[in-house]
Image (tube, rainbow, N blue to C red):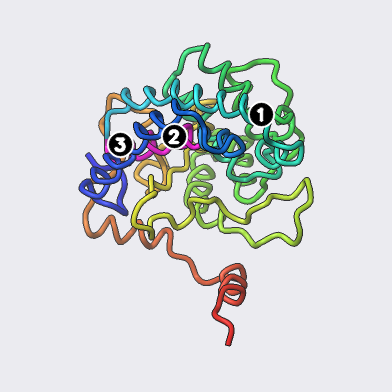
């Protein structure tokens, strides 16, 4: 049964099929001599990304939860290979922008998602250790109180950060984690409801080492494109629920909450897609034009 309310099953069938074939071609090309050794690490890293996107796309389509973990090993294999190749290509500055949770919002979110998926899908200890080695490249351990604590639920002894790399939107989730049990469910719901909107952040002035490069994730508004969309799933909430035993009852049925990850035997928490549920999902992601949008319109508007 479809879990995503913004696209139908025919759309996901088409693009999942396309991505599977694209991934096969990428693997074949990967075995050929590289045309540009400077680009080779990034090309291999895109194979890792493609595996993550396929996992999320198949969740959106309604595929069995038990089938999703098959993407973890090829994802880890490609990521490790990209890092090995990148040692000879990426400068120290590029290494920081690629790996730092504080600087790279996309990387922070991807790491949070992968930790949440690893916990929910119960990947084995060998895969878990490989994942930790990758997400901690660049010295991320001890830099983010929330993600460090989620990881520490499975990895006792982990050093815990004293602040948040990205307070917006993650301060809400940290507050839910720290709240009394009686308040956690409602506060978790508020985080999930605000998660997508609050990831549309104001652009930063300049680029300091401690400042995020981008104001919002690369996949923001992907549903407007012909392809590439894999769903808008707040896996971070699932990670917290799994790590801390939080009550997620108030989140069941929310458009962004991938609660089926925690209920592999079903039934699904997602309502059957209808015109009404699709309209509700669109309403959730519709936002008034903010300052960031006005700035982008001004910058990119045709000059006369």
Q: In the figure, 161 relative to 205: above or below?
A: above
Give the x, y percent position of residue 35.
52, 37
Is 30 inside the magenta-drawn segment?
A: no
Left of 91 or right of it: where is 53?
left
In the image, 61 versus 254, the foreground residue is: 61
Looking at the magenta stretch, what is its main secondary structure?
A: helix
Q: In the figure, 259 relative to 290: above or below?
A: above
Left of 3 or right of it: where is 262?
right
Number of other residues with Cα within 10 Å of mark 2, as a class: few under 14, some 14 to 19, many 20 or more? many
Instruction: Check disc 1 and report the residue beneath it.
Output: 148
What range of the chain is rendered magenta?
46-62
**Which mark is on residue 52?**
2
Helix, strand or loop at label 1? It is: helix
Helix, strand or loop at label 2? It is: helix
Left of 17 or right of it: where is 127?
right
Q: In the figure, 68 relative to 50: above or below?
A: above
Q: Residue at x 52, y 72 (%)?
A: 289
Instruction: Check disc 3 and report the residue beneath it.
Output: 21
Q: Residue at x 28, y 35 (%)?
A: 268
Please report whichever mark, 2 or 3, sits nearer to the chain's N-terminal start. 3
């Amino acid at each position: 049964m479809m879990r995503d309310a913004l696209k139908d099953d025919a759309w996901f069938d088409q693009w999942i099929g396309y991505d599977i074939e694209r991934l096969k071609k990428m693997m074949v090309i990967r075995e050929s001599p590289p045309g540009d050794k400077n680009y080779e690490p990034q090309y291999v890293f895109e194979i890792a990304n493609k595996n993550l996107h396929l996992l999320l796309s198949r969740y959106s389509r309604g595929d069995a939860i038990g089938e999703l973990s098959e993407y973890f090993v090829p994802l880890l294999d490609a990521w490790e290979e990209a890092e090995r190749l990148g040692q000879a290509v990426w400068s120290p500055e590029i290494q920081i922008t690629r790996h730092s949770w504080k600087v790279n919002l996309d990387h922070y979110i991807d790491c949070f998602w992968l930790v949440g998926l690893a916990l929910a899908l119960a990947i084995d200890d060998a895969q878990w250790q490989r994942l930790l080695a990758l997400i901690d490249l660049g010295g991320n351990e001890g830099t983010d109180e929330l993600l460090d604590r989620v990881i520490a639920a499975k990895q006792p002894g982990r050093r815990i950060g004293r602040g948040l790399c990205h307070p917006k939107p993650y301060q809400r989730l940290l507050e839910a984690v720290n709240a009394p049990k009686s308040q956690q469910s409602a506060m978790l719901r508020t985080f999930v409801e605000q998660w997508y909107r609050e990831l549309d952040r104001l652009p930063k002035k300049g680029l300091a080492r401690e400042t995020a490069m981008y104001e919002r994730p690369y996949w923001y508004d992907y549903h407007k494109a012909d392809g590439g969309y894999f769903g808008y799933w707040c896996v971070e909430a699932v990670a917290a629920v799994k790590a801390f035993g939080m009550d997620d009852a108030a989140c069941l049925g929310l458009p962004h909450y991938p609660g089926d990850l925690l209920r592999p035997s079903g039934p699904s928490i997602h309502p059957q897609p209808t015109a009404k549920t699709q309209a509700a999902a669109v309403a959730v992601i519709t936002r008034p034009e903010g300052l960031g949008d006005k700035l982008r319109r001004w910058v990119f508007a045709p000059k006369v």
